[in-house]
Amino acid sequence: PIPTITNIDNMNDSDIIDQAFEFSKKYDIVLSINDRLDIITDGKDVWEIYNHNPLVDFSGINSTLTSVIAPFIAVNNANENNNNRNNNNNNKVDESDNSNEETLNIDDSSINDTDQNSFGFKCATGVAYFRISTEKAGKDAITYKHGPGTFKQHLLDTLYSISYNEVEQLAKVVHHKNYNNNNSEDQM
């Protein structure tokens, strides 16, 4: 049988976070629960993302979230693999090949480099980008007096054009480091 978390609709946020954390820890996975509050955990840390646009609830767009998260994991892993390959090649690095590349990293002084390389952090970053993009796209759809049908079009345009600075300014993320100990809480 496939393991599940049940009765989530009848739980308060802290109970959902606790259940998600234990589930992630037990099965050694990164778990993302997406609703009005997004909860991401890797069994060590927990991220709560409070950016939410109600248009997501009935537009069917939430199912594309995984396709937005995947590049955050792939890009960073590709950069790590390239760095390892370059370091193993007599420590010669050809900088000219990377002139147009940008690595998407949240640069927050409260988060160390090890955390930025975790799948949980990468997943939380992807969810934050997606949620901020849905908020911006929703405002565009309303501003131009379009309905929810154009929301998807605005979302695709926003995902393409959103900047790191916009995400950094608009993200409503709480990061619980070492959640099991529950001793540290940082805002991103």
Image (spheres, grey):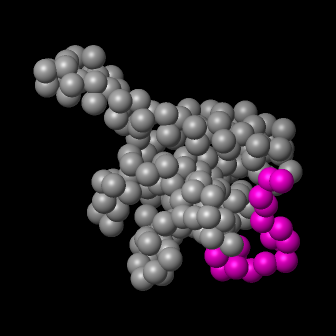
Q: Is residue 40 magenta?
A: no
Q: How many marks?
A: 0
Q: Position of residue 180 (x, y in %)?
A: 50, 77
Q: Is residue 166 above or below residue 77?
A: below
Picture layout, residue 181 above or below residue 52:
below
At a point 76% along the width and 43% down the height, the residue shown is 63
- Residue 165 x/y as whole percent: 41, 49
Q: Quadrant of residue 26?
A: bottom right
* Residue 10 placement, left or right of 50: right
Residue shown at 58%/64% (left/top)? Answer: 25
Position above or below: 39 against 85: below
For residue 2, above or below residue 154:
below
Which is more toward the observer, 7 or 53?
A: 7
Q: Is residue 94 left or right of residue 4?
A: left
Residue at 45% x, 42% y: name it: 163
Question: Is residue 51 in sight in this rendering?
Answer: no
Q: Nearer the viewer, residue 92 or 160?
A: 92
Magenta residues span: 1-18
Location of the C terminus (image quadrant): bottom left
Residue 183 position, x and y percent, is 42, 82
Give the side of residue 93 with respect to residue 123, left or right.
Answer: left
The percent position of residue 59, horizontal first and vertical second, equals 83, 45
Task: Decide if residue 2 is in sight here.
Answer: yes
Check if residue 7 falls in the magenta segment: yes
The quarter of the displayed image where residue 66 is located = top right
